[in-house]
Amino acid sequence: MVLRLVASLALSAFIASSALAQGKAPAAAEKKATPQQERMKKCNADAKGMKGDERKKFMSACLSDKAAAAAPEKKPTAQQDRMKKCNAEAKSMKGDERKKFMSTCLKG
């Protein structure tokens, strides 16, 4: 009799824990991936077909974002070029004189 009671309680506990575990699984799947996880996913996809040291080297560079740092510099925009030119011309000016000149120069 006691053995049946213990067996019933053990079975109930097992069923309850299984039900709770199933209830938690979808919540875990709904979590949004972190930026690092997204980067890892992209790097893994890009490294498909690579093996050994080649893959290791690629993954290291990809995950540390060295590839983006090694990308060629962007060409300055017209506004950036104008700012550089105006700054060079206003080098000796200070205060309100510089503000007024820069405002006029940057407007074109």
Image: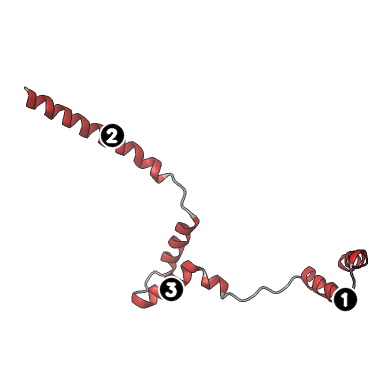
Q: Earlier in the sequence, mark 3 or mark 2?
A: 2
Q: Do labels 1 and 3 touch, CB within 8 Å? A: no
Q: Amino acid at mark 2?
A: Ala
x 41%, y 65%: residue: 44
Q: Nearer the viewer, mark 1 or mark 3?
A: 1
Tell me which amino acid carries mark 1.
Answer: Glu
Residue furthest to the top in view is 1
Query: Callout 3: few (<14), some (14-19), or many (20+) C-alpha neighbours within 10 Å?
Result: some
For label 3, the residue is: 58
Q: Quadrant of residue 70?
A: bottom right
Picture quarter containing residue 2? top left
Q: Position of residue 45 (x, y in %)?
A: 42, 65
Asked which secondary structure carries label 3, the reply is helix
Mark number displayed over residue 5? none
Is there CB contact under 8 Å for labels 2 and 1?
Answer: no
Instruction: Give the Cα separation between the discs numbered 2 and 1.
Output: 74 Å
Mark 1: secondary structure: helix
Local crowd size for mark 1, using a 10 Å CA cut-off: few (<14), some (14–19), many (≥20) = some
Q: Amino acid at mark 3?
A: Phe
Q: Nearer the viewer, residue 93 or 74?
A: 93
The residue labelled by disc 1 is 89
Image coords of residue 63 (percent x, y): 47, 67
Instruction: Of the two numbered discs 1 and 3 on the same chain, state the one appearing first in sequence.
Output: 3
Scheme of colours in the image: secondary structure
Marks 3 and 2: CB-CB under 8 Å? no
Spatial CA distance of label 3 from label 2 is 43 Å
Residue 3 is left or right of residue 14, and the answer is left
How many badges with numbers are in the image?
Answer: 3
The percent coordinates of residue 36 (x first, y second) are 47, 59
Task: State the mark number for residue 19.
Answer: 2
The relative height of residue 20 versus residue 36 in the rendered view (above or below) is above
